[in-house]
Image (tube, rainbow, N blue to C red):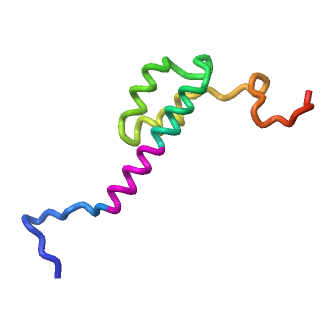
Amino acid sequence: MNKRSGGRRKPDRGALGFLAGVQLTLAAVAWTDLAMRPAAEIRGSKRRWAVIIAVNFVGPIAYLTWGRRPMNPATHAVGRPHGDS
């Protein structure tokens, strides 16, 4: 039988560690994408999105969902085989 002091439960350290890892991974992916993507392919300013990404889970998800414009395949050669015209 677990005893609770004051009716409050201590947070599980493993769950908090997992959530912190997810948060940091999301932020790292979003900041990396923001740094490498041309400003013309971003909705709004890069500086504003860099600050928004720092806001818990909401910031990176917002950037990855709404902050990026669709890529123009004609201007990005990434993933195209060599010799293709």
Residue 34 lies, in percent from the top left, at 54, 28
Above or below for 24 versus 42: below
Residue drawn at 49 percent across, 32 percent down: 31
Residue 82 lies, in percent from the top left, at 88, 33
Q: Main secondary structure of the magenta part?
A: helix
Q: How many marks?
A: 0
**Quadrant in the picture for the N terminus:** bottom left
Above or below for 4 versus 63: below
Residue drawn at 42 percent across, 35 percent down: 59
**Residue furthest out toward the left:** 6
Above or below for 17 versus 25: below
Residue 55 lies, in percent from the top left, at 36, 35
- Judged left or right of residue 41, residue 29 is left
- Judged left or right of residue 81, residue 14 is left
**Residue furthest out toward the front:** 82
Residue 23 counted in the magenta span: yes
Residue 35 lies, in percent from the top left, at 54, 26
Front residue of 75 and 13:
13
**Residue furthest out toward the bottom:** 1
Front residue of 4 and 65:
4
**Quadrant in the picture for the C terminus:** top right
Give residue 41's quadrant in the image: top right
Residue 78 counted in the magenta span: no
Residue drawn at 65 percent across, 29 percent down: 70
Q: Which region shows up in magenta?
A: 14-25
- Judged left or right of residue 15, residue 50 is right
Residue drawn at 37 percent across, 50 percent down: 20
